[in-house]
Image (cartoon, helix red, strand yellow):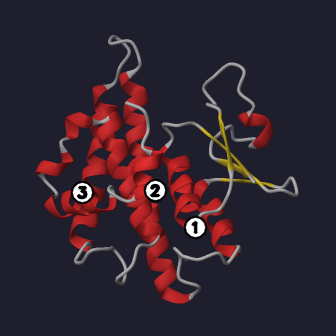
Amino acid sequence: MKLTASLTSPYARKIRILLAEKQIPCELVVDSPWETATSVPALNPLGKVPVLETDDGEAFFDSPVIAGFLEALDIPPHFIPQAGMPAVRVRQTEALADGILDAAVLAYLETLRPAEARLQSSIDRQHDKINRALARLESQLTGEFFHDDRISLADVAVGCALEYLDLRAPGLDWRAHYPRLKAFLAQIGERDSFVSTRPPA
């Protein structure tokens, strides 16, 4: 298999962590859709990473879809409950974490605009979304992990979202306001899969 991803993409990192945790051999092709010579649009018409190509040549894109594909391979450990409400709840937490990423990306892109064209109101709006989502996650985290007593896709997604905030929105200083999430990341961030996929500074 082959994974096309940029090293700073938190969506791609989520998949890289799952591959590492499941010990699935996969070639990493570093490619950014922002580069002029990118091959990403040829793989994903939406021009986004990650994209996972199977040995049969089939391409899957969008990180929740790829995560579902990896689970369908039935290679332990499993990160999504097989069915029912437990699976829905894990997926909902993943969606909340991905929503944090969506807002963080939009806010970061706004900061790259020239100062005279930058809309601070747009940045503030995205930061409000992030803080509301963080507050919800803080209230939901009552144990070591978000669901049951073992790591799931929800935990991977939240961990990636929190570290992306460190990378792209350090001014939010989320650790000062969300102590449970701070402790959560301190623990999960020590896993080999997180350490080995951490984006370059």
Q: In the image, residue 115 lies at what x, y percent? A: 32, 13
The residue positioned farthest toward the bottom in the image shown: 84
Q: Earlier in the sequence, mark 2 or mark 1?
A: 1
Residue pointed to by mark 3: 186
Q: In which quadrant of the rendered image does the N terminus lie?
A: bottom right
Residue type beneath disc 1: Lys
In the image: residue 88, left or right of residue 33? left
Q: In the image, residue 192 lies at what x, y percent? A: 42, 56
Mark 2 vs mark 3, CA separation in Å: 14 Å
Secondary structure at badge 1 equals helix
Q: In the image, residue 70 lies at what x, y percent? A: 65, 67
Residue type beneath disc 3: Ala
Q: Which residue is drawn at 28% across and 57% down?
A: 185
Residue pointed to by mark 2: 193
Residue type beneath disc 2: Ser
Crowd tier of the residue under label 2, counting other residues whose Cα lies within 10 Å: few below 14, some 14–19, many 20 or above: many
Residue pointed to by mark 1: 22
In-front residue for pair 95/30: 30
Is mark 1 in CB contact (under 8 Å) with mark 3? no
- In the depicted structure, whether residue 34 falls above or below residue 182: above
Q: Residue at x 32, y 51 (%)?
A: 162
